[in-house]
Image: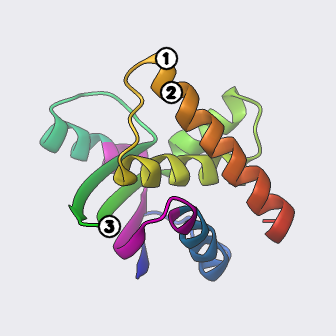
Amino acid sequence: MINYYYETKFHLYNEILFSKFIFFVVSKEKKNIKELNFIFCDDNYLININKKYINKNNYTDVITFENYENKNLYGDIFLSIKRIKYNSFKFKKLFFNELKRVMIHAVLHLIGYKDKNKFEKKIMYKKENFYIFFFNKKYVC
C-alpha cells in the first residue's frame, strides 16, 4: 500500500501513476511493499524533523524512516517540495523528474542501497536514471 499525505499546498497530479512508478521500481528490485507513506511538506516542516530525529540543523530534500520486514518495505518518506524545486532549478532538471529521482532515491535506501561513498553513489545514480528513463518512456509523466 502506498499512501500520500500533504503538509503543503502541493499535491501530486496523479497519485495512481506515481504509485505505479514506485511499484515498478520495487518489483524490479525484487521486493514487495507493505506500506510506504510519502509525506510532502515544506522546508520548515522537514528541518524540524531533521533536528528532532537526526540531530542535524540543515535543509534537505528527503528524509526516510525505515522499518524493513523480510522482503517487505515499510517506511515513511518526507519530501520538501521547496527543496526539490530548488534542486531542479540548480541542476537544470524538470521538476517532476527531480521529484521522481528523490522518490526513487528514498525507496532505494529502504531497499538497502547506500550512498556513503563514490562507488555507492554511482550505483544509486545509475539506478535512478534507469528508472526515470524507463518510466518516462512508458508512462510519460
Where is residue 44 shown, x and y percent of the image? 34, 44
Establish if 127 lies above or below 13. above
Among numbered discs 3 and 2, the one appearing first in the sequence: 3
Residue placed under numbered mark 2 in the picture = 121
- Identity of the amino acid at label 3? Lys
Query: Residue at label 3?
Result: 71
Q: Is residue 6 visible?
A: no
Q: Amino acid at mark 1?
A: Lys
Q: Which residue sits at x=49%, y=17%?
A: 118
Q: First in sequence: mark 1 or mark 3?
A: 3
Residue at 67 percent of width and 76 percent of height = 17
User: Residue visible at 51% across and 58% down?
Assistant: 29
- The residue indicated by pointer 1 is 118
| Magenta span | 26-46
Q: Are marks 2 and 1 in contact (CB under 8 Å)?
A: yes
Q: Is residue 33 highlighted in magenta? A: yes
The quadrant in which the C terminus is found is bottom right
Secondary structure beneath label 1: helix
Magenta span includes 103: no
In which image quadrant can residue 48 be found? top left
Image point 50% across, 21% down: which residue?
Answer: 119
